[in-house]
Image (cartoon, helix red, strand yellow):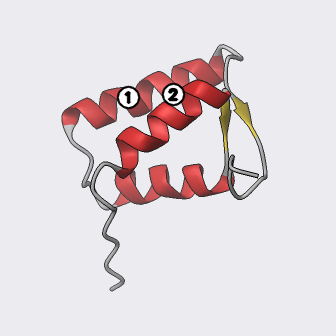
Amino acid sequence: MISLDLLPNALSELFAQVSVTGQITLADRYGLLAAILTNTASEDEMRSIDRLLRAFCRGRLKVVDDLSALS
């Protein structure tokens, strides 16, 4: 079994970056996937993930295939 360990504050940085750019990158999506599948996200982080999903459903968040928003 593969062990995935997220960096400390990685999710909060991800939420801040997505909020500023309005885009979620490929790396962001993999980070969210890792947090969800490893069940390492706190209750507050899970609520933030829910907010990101709602923003996407409402058209306020664009999914891009870029690896990073820092291009």
User: Which residue is denoted by mark 2 in the rendering?
Assistant: 52
| SS class, disc 1 | helix
Residue, x 56% and y 50% (percent of image)? 28
The three-letter amino acid code for the residue at tag 2 is: Leu
Query: Left or right of 52: which side holds 22?
Result: right
Residue, x 66% and y 30% (percent of image)? 21
Q: Which mark is residue 48?
A: 1
Residue 42 in which image quadrant: top left
Residue 60 point in image, percent of width and height? 67, 17
Residue, x 27% and y 56% (percent of image)? 8
Residue 7 point in image, percent of width and height? 33, 61
Query: Left or right of 38: which side holds 61?
Result: right
Q: Nearer the viewer, residue 48 or 16?
A: 16
Dot 2: few (<14), some (14–19), or many (≥20) neighbours within 10 Å?
A: some
Name, please, the residue furthest toward the front: 71
Q: Which mark is residue 36?
A: none
| SS class, disc 2 | helix
Q: Are marks 2 and 1 in contact (CB under 8 Å)?
A: yes
Residue, x 65% and y 13% (percent of image)? 58
Residue 37 point in image, percent of width and height? 37, 58
Q: Is residue 50 above or below residue 38?
A: above
